[in-house]
Image (cartoon, rainbow, N blue to C red):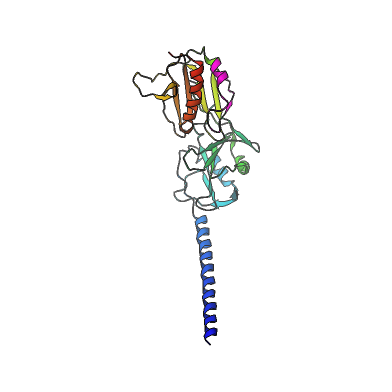
Amino acid sequence: MTSQFNRTAIFISLGLSIVMVLAVLFGAKYVFNNIAKAPVAVSPVESKEADSQACHSFIDSLPDKVMDKPRADIAEPVPSGVAAWAANSEDKVTVRCGVDMPFQYTEYAQTQDLEGEKWYKVRDATPGSNLTTWYAAQRFPIVAVTAPTDAEPGELNDALSALKEKPAPAHKAPLKELKAGDDQRCADIEKALPDSVAEGYHRREVAEKNTFVWSADGREDIVARCGVAKPENYRAGVKLQQVNEIPWFEDTTLAHGTTAGTWFALGRDNYLALHAPQDAAQAALVEIGGVLAKHTAEK
């Protein structure tokens, strides 16, 4: 009897344990599914064309699934011209119609051709972020697609047909409007500049004289221009940043959507300006400063 009782108790305990495990699993699945189905919060941004008929037509033509994620509701208040797809609260894709191109989309910017549509890629520079935003660069109103991966938005190309074909206007190229100065040393500097001045950046050619550009995937360009005039905002006694042999004057006004600054190399027989994202600037100052130290004379 005692042995039979013990076996019965064990079987009952085992059965209860299995039931509890199943309950936890089904409960977790229920919670996960409900979180996945929860409305996606999309913060409002300036979108002048978001309420246009073209954007309404675009939003209406979007597919039910994007990047393997189902279409999600938008949390109230719902901004105009937005849509979202979500696997859960963290793994989501959002679309905005009617936005402006980001400040880093300049005359030097490079787009990527994805199945016949040109897109401009911008990685979020916030530390720890894995967000990437793609801008449709040949459609109006402009569309921006943000996802937590590098997944390409080509599957949205069909919906873009609801929008007019029109190249997005580019912002002025960095340093282009600076006044010219003495450029007698620039040919030597150009030959000595390295292929890369920061991690992931590689040099490429542009048409402007004495202008040198390095690009990285999804990053804002690094631009240097040799033979510019003395910086207008420089005053004796202002704080300088000494990097090895070169003192640099930072003359920076950050614009919305960019983390880039502008530096001028001082103390040499001609002036060089550098435009670079803050997180790549130090490496660029070291590399370019080394070239200046070798190929320009002190004043």
Nearer to us in this view, 111 or 274: 274
Say whether residue 207 is magenta.
yes
The answer to whether residue 148 is above or below residue 274 is below
**Magenta span main SS:** loop
The answer to whether residue 264 is above or below residue 161 is above
Provide residue 98's location: percent of width, then percent of height.
51, 38
Provide residue 297's location: percent of width, then percent of height.
47, 14
Provide residue 263's location: percent of width, then percent of height.
44, 24
Residue at the limit of the structure toward the right, as seen here? 115
Residue 121 in sight: yes
Mark count = 0
The answer to whether residue 259 is above or below residue 296 is below
Quarter location, residue 154: top right
Q: Residue at x 48, y 22 (%)?
A: 289
Q: Is residue 28 left or right of residue 152?
A: left
Q: Quadrant of the C terminus?
A: top left
Residue 141 in sight: no
Q: Residue at x 61, y 34 (%)?
A: 112
Residue at the limit of the structure toward the bottom, as seen here? 1
Provide residue 243's location: percent of width, then percent of height.
44, 25
Please give the range of residues in magenta: 188-208
Say whether residue 93 is magenta.
no
The answer to whether residue 15 is above or below residue 36 is below
